[in-house]
Amino acid sequence: VGKSMEKLSSGLRINRAADDAAGMTIAENLRAQVIGLSRAVRSPARD
């Protein structure tokens, strides 16, 4: 019951690696890419 409540209250499909290890890995890699791209956009262009 606790696990179901955690999923419902968070609104997330994956709350921890045990829920979906492969999905968690993909999500973390995408998150890292987004952070890197965001930093690249914010930093001034260097010629």
Image (spheres, helix red, strand yellow):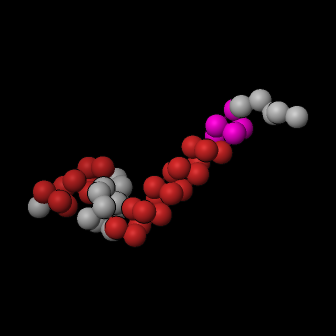
Residue 4 in the image, given as x and y percentages of width and height: 19, 61
Please tell me which residue lies in front, 8 or 42.
42
Q: Residue furthest left?
A: 1
Residue 39 in the image, given as x and y percentages of width and height: 64, 37
| Quadrant (top left/top right/bottom left/bottom right) for the N terminus | bottom left
Counting every numbered tag in the picture gives: 0
Residue 17 in the image, given as x and y percentages of width and height: 30, 61
Residue at 39%, 62% in the rendered image: 24
Residue 39 within the magenta-colored segment of the rendering: yes
Q: Is residue 42 left or right of residue 33?
A: right
The span picked out in magenta is 38-42
Q: Is residue 47 left or right of residue 17?
A: right
Residue 44 within the magenta-colored segment of the rendering: no
| Quadrant (top left/top right/bottom left/bottom right) for the C terminus | top right
Residue at 46%, 59% in the rendered image: 27
Residue 18 in the image, given as x and y percentages of width and height: 26, 65
Please tell me which residue lies in front, 1 or 23.
23
Residue at 42%, 63% in the rendered image: 25
Q: Quadrant of residue 35?
A: top right
Q: Is residue 15 left or right of residue 45?
A: left
Residue at 65%, 45% in the rendered image: 37
* Picture layout, residue 41 above or below residue 3: above
Q: Residue furthest front?
A: 47
* Picture layout, residue 6 above or below residue 18: above
Q: Residue furthest top?
A: 44
Q: Residue furthest right?
A: 47
Q: Main secondary structure of the magenta part?
A: helix
